[in-house]
Image (spheres, rainbow, N blue to C red):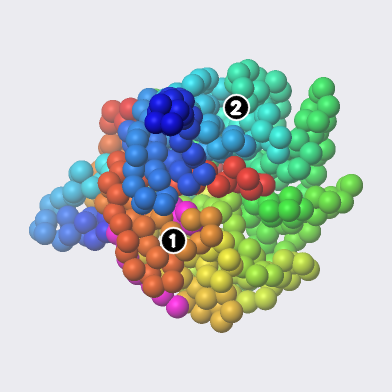
Amino acid sequence: MILALLIAGTANAGDAPRVDAQALERFVLQDCGSCHGLTLKGGLGPDIRPQSLEHYDRETLSSVVLDGIPGTAMPPWRPLLSRAEADWIATYLLTGDTE
Amino acid sequence: MKRLFLAAALVLSGPAMAQPTGDLGLVVERASGSLLVVDQSERARIGRIEGLGDLSHASLVYSPDQRFAYVFGRDGGLTKVDILERSIVNRVIQGGNSIGGAISDDGGLVAVSNYEPGGVRIFDADTLEMVADIPTGSKTIGLVDIPGRRFVFTLWDAGETWIADMSGDEPAITKITGMGENPYDALVTGDGRTYITGLFGADHLTALDLWQDDPKPQPILDGYAAGREGLPVYKMPHLEGWALAGNEFVLPAVGQREVLWVDARDLTETGRTATHGQPVFAIARPDGRQVWVNFAHPDNDTIQVIDTMSKEVVHEFKPGPGVLHMEFTPRGHEVWLSVRDAGKVIVYDTRTFEKLREIDAESPSGIFFTARAHRTGL
Ligand code: HEC
């Protein structure tokens, strides 16, 4: 369902890939939240609120999301997310008010 | 005569406690931090309890009299609620980040396991005063109760299982090392004898025979994914709603689209069933004849029903987006599913698969019927 939404979000976007921000925010809170906590303050995976990710730039963070962290429980999301969507998530994680 | 009857009616209808709780239940509304009180026979919501904080992944256990529930929230909150009064009786913030809990066989102690700081804390069930603090230095998962006022739990980082015996004045801890890499959840059988942990970091599960004085880790289903590429795991499977179907367990595989069948006595593999997606819960109907399976993202709109005798999928349907949890009525004639993104709890007949009722709920996740009060390990 979410996947379908996301694909629909990028497919219509032409050259400048647009993403469905609302669906992505929900996705981050619910699906990343299943390991990182619904408020992203940590669970099986660590705290990923902005203050905990200060050492990341946007591009690196986006790659962590796409490739995961091999050898750990952090999965690669490339099969489910486009680069544009991962970039949006990286920006959201670095700046977003996720409380 | 009439007067006598009236007087009796007054006495009976007076206190709210006169309502029985045996067929009631609670549904966790995870986003709004509330619980719906539901009536399983009426297939209806009959009340709501609010103000419980962050309830993502919240679970709960019941007091032996089925009147109170102890709710374990992700914000570290331990809340005791009164189902009859629909109110919060007591609430403590017991840790930073809790993951689950259990109640002792005598109903006297409630234990909570925490990720951060890692460990288990044990509380008096009446007052919620802390009676024991057991730091483990590790994220702690798979907490269950076993007979004899004991609790069992497992360390994600260290791969150890600990047994805390609370029958004396001080907790007596037994540590079992070598359970395997990154245990993510565990189950105990209804007799309190067999404890099984699923491993994220290894290609097997590990069992313990808790009836032994000195339980030894026993790898089971060794190499179940050998030679096959593991799929990315987007949601850790749950073992807690374990399935004992006849003489076999059914367990969700990690990183594979299948469930695994294991002989309950000698713990050898007896079969596999390919499934629609990566299983999250595989739960047997109470009579053991069927196993219902739900799946991780992006397949979490689907349910498959497996027949225990043939081990084949006999029914598949899509209740809606985000099927998070299933709970059978105690004798299994109906099942309640929470469909998070549709904002509904849906009730089905388990024989005809007919939809019987939709009940509105806000981001529903766990569903817990009070019959759990009388089952070890739930
Ligand atoms: C199945 C569980 C799981 C899911 C789902 C998950 N993560 Fe993770 N994540 C982890 C674990 C475990 C780690 C820590 C890995 C390690 O040991 O370094 C982690 C680490 C991370 C880190 C690195 C944090 C740091 O401080 O370096 C980021 C960023 C992250 N996850 C983002 C996400 C995002 C975004 C999503 C959703 C698209 C997500 N995660 C979904 C388990 C998960």
Which residue shows up at 36% across the image and 51% down it? B43
A45 sits left or right of B118 in the view = left
Relative vertical location of residue B283 with respect to residue B289 in this rendering, above or below: above
Q: Nearer the viewer, residue B24 or A59?
A: B24
Q: Is any part of residue B67 visible from this angle?
A: yes
Give the residue at the far front of this rendering. Answer: B1
Quarter of the render that holds ligand 1: top left
Which residue shows up at 75% across the image and 61% down it? B219
Q: Give the mark, 2 or 1, whose residue is nearer the N terminus.
A: 2
Q: How many numbered badges does the structure rendering display? A: 2
Q: Nearer the viewer, residue B317 or B109?
A: B109
Residue B80 on image: x %, y %: 51, 27
Q: Chain of mark 2?
A: B
Q: Is any part of residue A67 visible from this angle?
A: no
Q: Which residues are magenta?
A: B314-328
Q: Amino acid at mark 1?
A: Glu
Which is more foreground, mark 2 or mark 1? 1
Which residue shows up at 43% across the image and 31% down it? B1
Task: List the residue tagged with mark 2.
Answer: B117
Q: Which mark is residue B334?
A: 1
Magenta span dominant secondary structure: strand
Q: Residues within 10 Å of mark 2 (few under 14, many from 20)?
A: some
Queried whether the magenta region covers residue B317, the answer comes back as yes
